Structure formats: C-alpha cells, structure tokens
Amino acid sequence: MNDLQPALPVLSARDLCREFSLPGDRSLEVLRHLDLDIHEAEMVAIVGLSGVGKSTLLHCLGLLDTPSSGQITYRSGGQTWQSPGLNEPQRCGLRNQFIGFVFQFFHLLSDLDVLENVMLPAIVGTPKSDWKQRKPQIEAKARTLLETVGLAGREEQAPGTLSGGERQRVAIARALINNPRLLLCDEPTGNLDSSTSEKIHTLLRQLHEDLGTSILVVTHDPDLASRADRRLAMIDGRFEKSADHPSD
C-alpha cells in the first residue's frame, strides 16, 4: 500500500529577487533570493520593520509587480501556473479568480454602494453573455458575505458613510466573492484603532477556519501575527526565522 503523498502548496516561490533601478546607474535590492510555500488552509504572517520588503513580496506574489528573477508557482484544482511564463490575460485571470486582496486603505469605489463594491470582482470576471444569468447568484453571494462579516442591512450604503473597520469588512467580503484559493492581506489593520483592529483580527481568523482559505498577511501587529499558523520574520529582504507560536 502506497503512502499518501503530501499535498502540494497552493503557492510556491523560489529564489525570488526584486531590484529597483535608482539614479546614477545604481540599484536597490529589496527581495533577496526568497523561498516560500503557502499550503492549503494555512494562515501565514510576515512581520518585520518598515522597508524590509514585505509589501514588495506581497505585490510580486499577487501579480501586481514582477520579480527581477525567480519563479512563482500557483496551484488550484489540479492546474498549475508559473510566473514568469504568464501572458497578461493569464495574469489578470489569476488575480481575479485565484487571489483575493485586502489592503490597508480599503480601495473601495465611492460611486458604488457597499453591495456593488463586494460584487465588483465577480462582475469583472463574468463574461457579458453570462451576466444576466449569473447576476442573481452573484448578488446573493455578496449579501451572504456581508452578513458573514457583520454588515447585513448595509448593502445600499455608500462606502464613505461607514467607519474604517466597516470599510475593511467590505473589502474582506469583496476579496472573497470569487472563492480565491489565497487571500493576500497587506497591513489590514494598519489604518485602524486598536479596538477595531481586534475585531478584524478575530474576523480574519474566523473566516480562515470556516472557509479554509489560505491566508498570507503582512503586518506590524504582533497580536494579528500571533494568530497565524506560522510566522516569518523579514530582515533586509530575506526571511530571518519562522515559529509556530512566537513570543514578542
């Protein structure tokens, strides 16, 4: 009887580097030969001082930026994609379907109401020919997600009428509308007060446990990092250490 093989990671990065050109033929090396695996239903926190490359790494993994060298592999449903090697439609498709984003400053559209903001990634990812048929299902799911994040009854409000914590909850619901395999969170509580941050911490962990979505979160917040399954500390563009339950 053959032993079961361990599941392949949802995301793998190998020998990842990112350099930026500076005036005077100089360059700034921000990411230095990083290796990273994110497994199914795992929550990983990346911590470190400002400027060590945390957000740059997240942007490269999320296909918002392009590494100078190295390879990133994405896996879902028996399919594999590798970057470099993706054309622009493939990059856009992975950003829309495989990855969900939560940013520090929410990035909600002020001319759309709360429900429409949550639906937006699904609207973008649905062919026009299928929209009429799929709209009721997408709208129902958006309403369910808003209920899940504690915003039932706020569907028709403008984002500007919500508190910071409420807007971040809308952003989290939006990130989940397409059932992403991986949720990338860049300082999701960095613009919130301590009380509101605590609520977002609890929400992210609860969603992780309930939905089984893999989560990679960049944070300065030691409390949020302590709730992850694994913590990676960055220094000078490299990972310094990892721990299951680190002390701060």
Image (tube, helix red, strand yellow):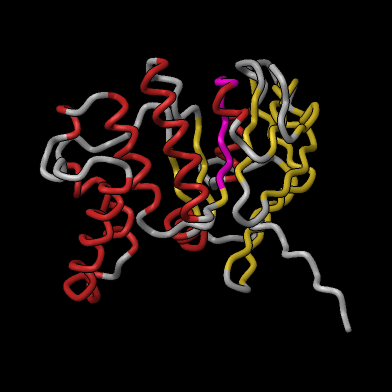
- Quadrant for the C terminus, please: top right
On screen, 29 above or below 7?
Answer: above
Residue 220 on the magenta segment: yes
The quadrant holding residue 130 is bottom left
Judging depth in this view, the residue of 140 and 199 nearest the camera is: 199
Residue 203: give x, y in percent of width and height. 42, 38
- Quadrant for the N terminus, please: bottom right
On screen, 1 above or below 87?
Answer: below
Identity of the residue drawn at 33% across and 37% down = 169
Horizontal relation, residue 109 to residue 17: left or right: left
Residue 152: give x, y in percent of width and height. 20, 45
Residue 151: give x, y in percent of width and height. 23, 41
On screen, 199 above or below 137?
Answer: above
Horizontal relation, residue 190 to residue 161: left or right: right
Identity of the residue drawn at 22% across and 54% down = 143
Q: Residue furthest bottom?
A: 1
Residue 179 on the magenta segment: no
The quadrant holding residue 83 is bottom right
Question: Residues in magenta?
Answer: 215-222
